[in-house]
Amino acid sequence: MIRTQIQLTEEQMKVLKEIASRKKISVAGLIREAVDEFIREEQGISYEKKKERAIRALGKFRSGKHDISVNHDKYLAEAYGQW
């Protein structure tokens, strides 16, 4: 890894420490995660755009089944040949 130095406001550091503590990781690890997410968004489709696409796809397909919400695990297992 390459060591670098950044300057953060006191409020930024306070919030980062709280989040890192909650996630049980270091502040450096949290910052690396954030940088990775930023790079992914810059290089491709962002999480928000993927989410938006998924939401737009809702209701556009029909399976012919009316109990998917109740038996979704069964149908997934059948689809993957595990039932």
Image: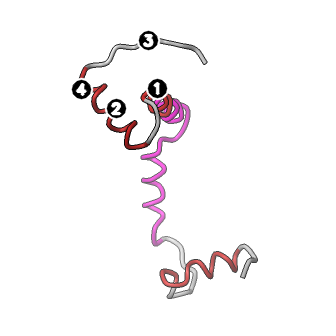
Q: What span is in magenta?
A: 34-59
Decide: few, some or many residues near mark 3? Use Cα within 10 Å; few <14, some 14-19, many ≥20. Answer: few
Q: Amino acid at mark 1?
A: Ala
User: Mark number for residue 17?
Assistant: 2
Looking at the image, is mark 3 or mark 2 nearer the viewer?
2
Q: Secondary structure at mark 3?
A: loop
Q: CA distance from mark 2 to mark 1?
A: 10 Å
Q: Residues within 10 Å of mark 1 (few under 14, many from 20)?
A: few
Mark 4 vs mark 2, CA separation in Å: 10 Å
Q: Amino acid at mark 2?
A: Lys
Numbered circle sitting on residue 5: 3
The Cα–Cα distance between marks 3 and 4, rounded to whole angstroms, is 17 Å
Tag in front: 4 or 2: 2
Q: Which residue is more in the foreground, 50 or 25? A: 25
The circle drawn on residue 11 is: 4
Give the image location of residue 11, x and y in percent.
23, 26
Q: Residue at x 59, y 78 (%)?
A: 73
Left or right, 78 with reference to 57: right
Picture coordinates of residue 61, whole percent (x, y): 53, 73
- For marks 3 and 2, the one nearer the N-term is 3
